[in-house]
Image (cartoon, rainbow, N blue to C red):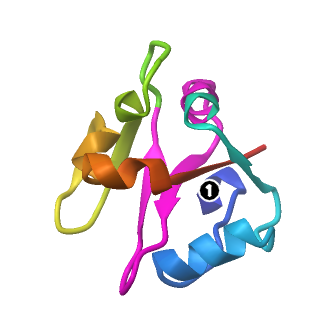
């Protein structure tokens, strides 16, 4: 994100989530899951993040090459217990947790 001039606030995922939701991350703003995928498809820095008890989690929304109609279709990359560069978001969270994921993008 730094290379794209879209630095995220430092710290763990929960700290990032707080900064983003409190508008303390310059240039970042909230979007819907479908807009997140559209923005990523256009090359804009875009993430999904969920604050959780203990440690939260953040993923990079990556281009998919097609439009989506459901949250579970958002294309992401992640590092953590499981690392991958291109899977749908349902590989990052359980289905019941997906509605709690917030999406942010940067101009």
Foreground of the two, 84 or 32: 32
Please give the name of the residue rendered at 38% of the width and 42% of the height, measured from the top-left corner: 76
From this view, report whether residue 71 is shown above or below residue 19: above
Pinpoint residue 105: horizontal percent, then vertical percent.
Answer: 67, 46
Q: Quadrant of the C terminus?
A: top right
**Residue drawn at (17%, 68%), measured in percent from left and top?**
81
Residue found at the far left of this picture? 82
The location of residue 94, given as percent across then percent down, is 25, 52
Residue 74 colored magenta? no
Q: Which residue is mark 1?
A: 3
Q: Is residue 60 magenta?
A: yes
Is residue 54 left or right of 28 when viewed as pictured?
left
Say if 97 sits above or below 89 in the image: below
Q: Looking at the picture, does residue 34 appear above or below residue 51?
A: above
75 vs 21, nearest the viewer: 21
**Left or right of residue 21: residue 67:** left
| Residue 1 percent coordinates (x, y) | 59, 57
Labels in figure, total: 1
Badge 1 crowding class, 10 Å Cα cut-off, few under 14, some 14 to 19, many 20 or more, is few
Q: Foreground residue, 35 or 26? A: 35
| Quadrant of the image occupied by residue 52 | bottom left
Report the residue at 60% width, 25% height from top: 38
Residue sitting at x 64%, y 68%: 8
Where is residue 46 shown, x and y percent of the image?
59, 45
Label 1 residue SS:
helix
Instruction: Give 92 or 107, whichever is nearer the viewer.
Output: 92
| Horizontal arrangement in the rendering, residue 31 relative to residue 92 (left or right) | right
Q: Which residues are magenta?
A: 36-62
Q: Residue furthest top?
A: 66
């Amino acid at each position: 994100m730094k290379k794209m001039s879209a630095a995220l606030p430092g710290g763990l995922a929960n700290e990032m989530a707080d900064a983003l939701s409190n508008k303390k991350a310059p240039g970042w703003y909230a979007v819907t899951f479908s807009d997140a995928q559209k923005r990523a498809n256009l090359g804009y820095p875009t993430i999904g993040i969920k604050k959780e008890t203990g440690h939260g989690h953040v993923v990079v929304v990556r281009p998919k090459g097609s439009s989506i109609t459901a949250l579970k279709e958002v294309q992401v990359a992640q590092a953590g217990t499981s690392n991958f560069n291109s899977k749908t978001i349902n590989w990052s969270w359980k289905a019941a947790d997906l509605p709690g994921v917030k999406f942010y993008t940067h101009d």
